Image: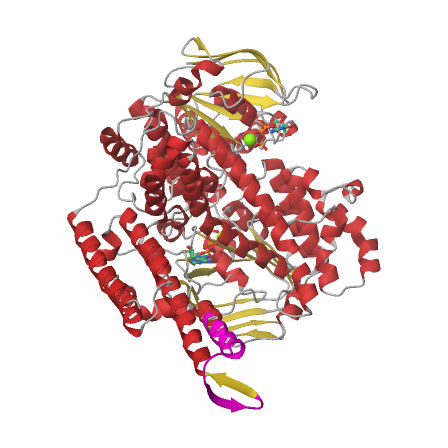
Amino acid sequence: MDITFKEVDYIYQYNTPFEHQALHNLSFHIPSGSFTAIIGHTGSGKSTLIQHLNGLIKPIQGEVTIGEFTLSSEKNHQVKDLRKHVGVVFQYPEHQLFEETVKKDILFGPKNFGFDLDRKEDELADVLNNVGLPVDVLDRSPFELSGGQMRRVAIAGVIVLEPSVLVLDEPTAGLDPLGRSQMLKLFSHLHQSRQQTTVLVTHHMEDALAYADQVIVMNQGKVEMIGEPKELFKKKERLRDIGLDIPEVFECANYIENKLGVSVNECQSNMEGISQVLVDFVKAGARS
Amino acid sequence: MNQSLIIGQYVPGESFIHRLDPRLKILIVFIFVLVIFSAETWMSFMTLFTLAIGSAIISRISVSYILKGLKPVWFIIALTFILHIFLTREGNILYSFWGVNLYDQALIQGANISARLFLLILMTTLLTLTTTPISITDAVEALLKPLNKLRFPVHELALMMSISLRFIPTLMQEMDKISKAQASRGLDLTTGPIKERVKAIIPLLIPLFISAFKRAEDLALAMEARGYRGGEGRTKLRELTFQKVDLLAAIVFIGIMIVFWLTRT
Amino acid sequence: MIKFDRVSFRYRDDSSKVINDINLSIDRGEWVALIGHNGSGKSTVAKMMNGLLLPSEGQVFIDDIELTEQNLIEVRQKVGMVFQNPENQFVGTTVLDDVAFGLENLGVDPEYMYERIQQSLKQVSMDGYEQHEPHRLSGGQKQRIAIAGVLAMLPEVIVFDEATTMLDPMGRKDLLQTMKTLKEERGLSIVSITHDLTEAAFADRVLVLNQGEVWFEGEPRQLFAKGEELENIGLEPPFVTKLYHQLKSENITLEREPLDFKELVDELWTLHLKK
Ligand SMILES: Nc1ncnc2c1ncn2[C@@H]1O[C@H](COP(=O)(O)OP(=O)(O)OP(=O)(O)O)[C@@H](O)[C@H]1O
Ligand SMILES: Nc1ncnc2c1ncn2[C@@H]1O[C@H](COP(=O)(O)OP(=O)(O)OP(=O)(O)O)[C@@H](O)[C@H]1O
Ligand SMILES: [Mg+2]
Ligand SMILES: [Mg+2]
């Protein structure tokens, strides 16, 4: 599903002394089937933005279109239908678990949305396999599992709905390095195998670079930049000004260019490329 | 989460009311609440209203904000009024329609009760709007101090109060987050039969309890790590001091109470 | 400063050992990183450093005095701790009250409190925030308030149990900078628990725990030199280590294992000049 924001404003605690404008005049487009990363410093409005995607909050001004659905400041009666198509995995999603067994918890969404439960039950083994959990956890209590496993259960509870849009708010926060890379591979796999539109909020520039085909940079409630990761991360100064880093590969490439005076071209901005540049540099030295 | 409900919130400010000694404020509100129920005449009500609304104005908190924040309370007040009108059967019949009689006493009593409720809520809300939670707990601890002699755990009670107050915003945020997460999984709290809706609260409450429990555990550990071992041998950063403005406020309050007492019946 | 002598720990008498016969020491003014996969026992070790847990076997010494039930308060004054979740260690309703909490527990005279609080807040660059409420601060700011609360108690060591994990990159960088300043300017010892090897590069010494035992002890450089072995115990080698690994496969070697890409490129540069 295509997603379009048109001049969206959002204000928390509207009409109180605590009023706080979190989004200013936001406009952008997320093409259907794309993998979009949203980056930005803390408090820049990333979580506020994604809550518009399934109608948890609605714009105070402007309009959000998701497929055929339109959200504006007016009341919308189709939000439940929208939520069926847009799955959201929140930060620390393991905090939402509540059922006695993993199975019940995963089927909570399908039950609410009126899916065919028997069919969904048959698919459970597949879903668990996808998130990297053994089938025997199904009858255990989610609260007996380790933190990382609980997170996988929570994620399974969303992907079992097979949403057309999958929204992820910092899904890897707090996991150890191994857990992190497994989780990202899972999302990338789902994106490819299901043609799912994926929106990933992340603080890791490396992840944005490795997986996204479009990056939205947020700054103080506004879209600061939007574009392809490789293009975008070239703008080191601008990113630094708004408190963001660039991926270490790019830092390294910059450093090599300054220090060694050899150029690293765009397609060499990865580990192999950089290593090649360095090898060439040393070999050239050996020859001269 | 109802964001317009303001009971229990603090609005920072520098007004005369904000700066009063919290012990005095609590005492005033306490006495005020006690005497509300002995008000009977127009004059005595006028005195109390003058005090309450006067304080609201001096506190410089926008009146429309206060009134809007009390919206859910209006409903209760109106309901009380209506119940009185239908249930009281004393005095003269003023009006009668469809076989229902409206007595003059019903009107008077209904108005009485509603006015008392309104005053009570307005004053207590004003207290929390102008006093930081920490000052309230400090004041409660100070006021209850004499009970220490009776082995009543005053310090522990005050600490418990201040920690709960500190965690209210956190738990509200948490509640908001959990209900959004469950709504994303299709949980619907706004439609369907009452029974279903009550059941739909479970997916919110369980995670909230678990998280509150986890927080309490973490917090206990953090407190212990910083050397906490109960009230014994402990000093306190804040000493409450009674100042000239407080004396002034106390005198004004006593004056008003005397006027009230004279006009009460 | 801190010394563990053949320490073991089990959570319940009938459960198995979570920490198994470990020895370690933290010297004055030293920065030690403690790393290891989820569940390897890092937090358990940290809690034994200030008596939140007492060892089931073996002894813990703080300044050569054995830690026992009797001297817990002195130990907790000397060994401060900052935890992972910024939200759950904020006791006070305002910054001022929170920083004062530890001092109140120690029974410090209120007259001296304000000065000590001011100093501590300044050291973490949070002066001016005295009246702020916790839920209006960012995660990084809350962590710095937690540090200030510990600093006010005049500790000798601060243990950071994954204190940077829940922060965004900026908050993380700021916090690491603060830790560095504390070490350099106040001569504090730092124990930092982390999953992030880039963060471990800040340390003078690294201890790696694996299933309750010390798997490695030495300089960060020596640890990075282990390369792929790290993956076996659930850790990820940093970017520079992977890059250097690639170079090595092309027969380019340096005199010492690089800590970051700057070191690596600089070394190559001198290597190039020499030829
Ligand atoms: N429920 C709320 N009430 C009031 N203000 C809020 C609320 N939620 C968020 N805000 C404010 O809105 C702004 C944007 O917050 P948001 O959570 O969208 O940021 P974010 O980019 O997701 O940050 P992070 O990286 O820390 O998750 C912040 O200034 C925040 O303080
Ligand atoms: N309160 C407790 N009761 C029983 N077992 C516990 C308790 N706390 C921890 N454990 C167990 O002790 C082991 C070590 O836990 P610890 O918390 O020290 O690990 P850690 O290295 O800090 O892990 P993480 O990276 O997840 O923080 C784990 O197997 C854990 O399940
Ligand atoms: Mg967020
Ligand atoms: Mg731990």
Q: Quadrant of the N terminus of chain A?
A: bottom right
Which one is in front, A36 or A154? A154
Please indicate, yes or no, whether residue C82 appears anywhere in the rendered image: no
Residue drawn 43% across the image and 34% down it? B153
Instruction: Give the vertical position of A197 relative to B170 (above or below).
Output: below
Would residue B216 appear left or right of A127 to someone viewing this image? left
- Toward which corner of the image does residue C174 lie, by quadrant? top left
Instruction: Give the vertical position of C174 relative to C24 (above or below).
Output: below
Instruction: Give the vertical position of C267 relative to A32 (above or below).
Output: above
Q: x and y percent of residue C8 in the render?
A: 60, 15
Residue drawn 41% across the image and 28% down it? B226
Q: x and y percent of residue C184 in the render?
A: 32, 24
Which one is in front, B129 or A227? B129
Q: x and y percent of residue A94 in the render?
A: 62, 46
Q: Is residue B93 in the magenta section?
A: yes
Magenta span: B77-99
Q: Quadrant of ligand 4?
A: top right
Would residue B252 appear left or right of B179 to someone viewing this image? left
Would residue A45 appear left or right of A81 to someone viewing this image? left
Q: x and y percent of residue C169 in the render?
A: 44, 43
Q: Determine the residue located farthest toward the left in the rendered image.
A: B244
Q: Quadrant of the C terminus of chain A?
A: top left
Please indicate, yes or no, whether residue B31 appears anywhere in the rendered image: yes
The colour mode here is secondary structure
Q: Is residue B222 in the magenta section?
A: no
